[in-house]
Amino acid sequence: VGHAKRSSSSSSTLLRSLSCWQPLESAATAPGSEVASSDSRSPGPSCSNGEKSFPAARLASSGCRAAGDAASDKTFEAAGSARAVSEEAAPAHSRLRLGRCGGLAAAAGVFLLSLVFTPCLSYSEWYIDELFAAVRNADARGETPLLELLQNDFWGNKLWNNWTHKSYRPLVVLSYACQYWFNQGEIKPQPLRAFNVALHSTNALLLFWWLRRLKASRRWAFLAAGLFAVHPVHTENVIYLVGRADAMATFCWLLALLSWPLDSSRNRGCISRVLRLCLAALLAVIAGLCKESGFCVLLQLAVSELLGFKPLRGALPLLSIFGLVFGARNWFTEGTAAGFSFVDTPVQYHEDIMVRFFTYLYFHSKYAQLMVFPWTLSWDYSHDALPVLAATWRDVRVLGILMTYLGVTAVASWGFSRRKRSVLLGLSNVLIPFVPASNAFFIVGTTIGERLLYPCNVGAAVVLASIGTCSAAGRKGGSSRLFACGLLLLGVFTYRCSLRVYQWSDREQLFGPDAVSYPQSTKTRHQYGTVLHKVGRFAEALIEFEASSEIFGGNGLTDYCMAQILLETGRADEARQKFEKIFKGHGLGFGAFNIYALYVDYGFTLMMLQRFEEAVHQLQLGLARNEDVPHGLNALGYSLISLRRPEEAQTAFERGLHYEPDNPYLRNNLGVTLMLAGNLDVGAEMVVRAAQMEPRVPAFTHNAILIRKLADTGSWPEEQLVLELFFNRAN
């Protein structure tokens, strides 16, 4: 009897362990059976080691007690089982149909939640780097031959030049070019964002499908995929066109996960294994050509194999393919090292290695906070939105680092102790795509990028759905309360996401709140200043520019914008000081594409100060780089007239009218120059025409009155004809 009791106890313990591992063994079941089992009213497997689960455990226990029972008892039990099966057969089919309908309803709910981004389809503004990636990039406009496009980075620069970010994403650039072609050569933001919305909705549905394959219950799969669909940080991936790269890579990532069997050991054929590996490699390459992190899907599949029944047999081929693909990519791009400015990545320039180490760990905790509690968002986290941890471990923000890594460790420990493979798969899907953004192996070109969390949130959804499903197998009350909290969080996320989508409706709505959330961000304060400057709120714009300059004084663009405001408000000498600061080595932000504006406006400032010789020199330097600056050509002509060089002045005014034929200022000034040169008829006609075009300008009215007096009297009046200046900051 004692031996029988020990055998019964041992058998029960073994069967309880097998019941907890059951999702591993039955992971490759058909979708129909998943729906039926998840919707069944019979109690599912408990994740507690102190509880028995599945009828097999009860049969084992009764079998140990009935070792000497008669065969008639077995016959009776078999008959009872047959009656139970016959009684429940019809309801099972009914539940199967209801389960399928419920699954479609849940998927439809996920799709509807993803439509929270649809208001962006009417947004017509371009934001920040979109101009460089999709508008000014000849590759994105389809003007570059395909072979040449494949040799350029995401921004249209040669991969092997000194100045490149090494961001090789040709498929994303080709997607821009295809849409440019479909729009008949006109690139607009609305169709581009419509593609992003459709892509995000598709990703949310693919995630829901994968969660169901992982045996997540229908309601928890809906909740997890719904949170992914309305996560506020995904606003950057949908509205901000640069974030398309992460969404496209995640699309291929999810396809790779869905195409890979959860239990590959059951597919014993060599040909099927080879075909499966080829498909996974193809999807990984496509994902990696959308975003560099996409190659890592091979590592995720390798983790799936390592958690299976034949880990080395399944994982080694995947790891080998990843090594080959990653090596080929590095060879083609000549490594991953890229030069990033101090403003974009200030931590890498800090001399203390411990400060760099702890600050990068702090960034990891910030990513975790944005993933779980995305309350304060920003389009930019560069210098000095998140100050470095100069005090290293003595900084109170280290508590956030500890909380982050303890949380990851706790989830991993829980998954291993409960033998929940899906939890471990989800956690690895959080960590693996995050590694390229972690600054662990190479410097990332952004301090914090909300769009980089897009593939990581796929893993977070898996973790949530797996834990929720496991809780549903335990006590019903606790599961209902947990699910109610999840629904509350879904409502909060939906509200926060809709608010963030509204903030992206225009630049003022975006940069204003971001400047309040992160007042130490030099880029955000600068961008908000440009918005205020554009609408003529000069005093407020100066406050923002000065705040940006106090945070980082080496940004030449900020000083340049302040100089423009000072020029427009008649404070030329203060503007001169800003320009001279830039020329003394604070020219960050100026390059070959915009240096002309610096020279032209500096020359304009010197002209306002009546330093005409110096003004002519600076204006000519700028106009030699880009002549299409009408206010600069007008200032050059004005300076030349003041230096008594009317022929050269006439040429300058004529060149200005070539670029802007209907400009009344250039027309008036050219007319005055012609009259001074003796060409009275043509000059007078141009002056009168300028007064008709802009009668509210006093100089034009004054000149028209003098011409009428000249026509009436036949002699020059005592008053002098005057020239007029204008300043166009749009150039």
Image (cartoon, grey):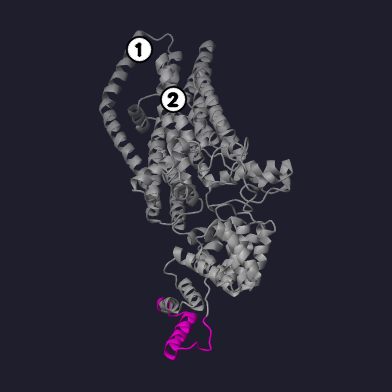
Instruction: Report the front residue among 225 and 76.
Output: 225
Residue 208 in the image, given as x and y percentages of width and height: 40, 37
Residue 639: say if magenta.
no
Kind of residue indicated by mark 1: Lys
Residue 324 in the image, given as x and y percentages of width and height: 53, 24
Instruction: Report the front residue among 217 and 687.
Output: 687
Element carrying mark 2 = loop
Kind of residue indicated by mark 2: Leu
In the rendered view, would you say 446 is above or below 43?
below
Circle number at residue 262:
2
Circle number at residue 375:
none
Q: Quadrant of residue 166?
A: top right
Q: Residue furthest left?
A: 90
Q: Which residue is mark 1?
A: 74
Which label's residue is closer to the chain start, 2 or 1? 1
Residue 9 in the image, given as x and y percentages of width and height: 52, 18
Question: Which residue is depicted at the point 47% across and 37% down?
Answer: 148
Question: Which residue is depicted at the point 38% across and 54% down?
Answer: 119
